[in-house]
Image: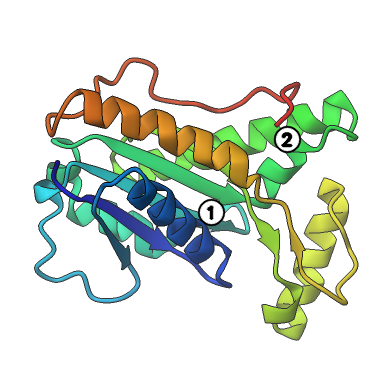
Amino acid sequence: MKPVLIAFASREGQTRRIAEHVATAVRARGDRVDVVDVASTTEGLDVGSYAAVVLAASVHLGKHEREMIAFVQTHRGALERVPTAFLSVSLSEAGVEDATAPFEKRSRAAIDVKKMVDDFCAAAGFHPDRIWPVAGALMYSEYGVVTRLVMRMIAKRQGASTDTSHDQEYTDWRALDRFVGAVMAEVEASGSHGVAASDPVAVAPPSHAR
């Protein structure tokens, strides 16, 4: 099979770690992987030569990284011809997955997640075949003073940790592995021709538990 491309946009590093984790999971299946930071130069990258493309982008202040939107806009034609999966990394998804939170709060978080994904698709002019929201992290140690205060307020509003003395990670790695496994099984079953886009958006309801 052709190699898999994992393209990511990360600010404090959690989405980079998620991209590298996905790469490790794909390699464990015996497949080849290229990992690309879209904030770096991607000149000459032939997106259409890959068996599948996994896009991963973090959310800050309600919007996905502009570098990922630009990357998708640039390579939209090629992306439309290969199977694609999009990992939307946000603190809002951590609110969706918080089993201790009231149903209403989880519902509001799920609405926020869906809106951010819809806004990304509209801005990029592209709808990936598969979409999976991923809970990110509060990287307090990486934030500047102002950003730390802003993120602390956002965390308080969403019920996340406001303890800025250390970073807080919410990523469900096992759920991510299951999603990657399902996507790769479909890609491998169809050879290099891709996955049929049946139900493109996989946004989990607020009542789920992972």
Give residue 31's position: percent from left, percent from top.
Answer: 26, 47
Give residue 188's position: percent from left, percent from top.
Answer: 23, 30
- The tag on residue 150 is none
Label 1–label 2 contact, CB within 8 A: no
Give residue 168's position: percent from left, percent from top.
Answer: 77, 62
For marks 1 and 2, give the one nearer the viewer.
Answer: 2
Residue drawn at (29%, 21%), measured in percent from left and top? 197
Q: How crowded is mark 1: few (under 14 residues within 10 Å), some or many (20 or more)?
A: some
- Residue pushed farthest bottom? 145
- The tag on residue 63 is 1
Residue drawn at (12%, 29%), measured in percent from left and top? 193
Residue drawn at (61%, 47%), measured in percent from left and top? 173
Under tag 1, what secondary structure? strand
Q: Tell me the quarter of the picture where residue 131 sits.
A: top left
Q: How crowded is mark 2: few (under 14 residues within 10 Å), some or many (20 or more)?
A: many
- The tag on residue 96 is 2
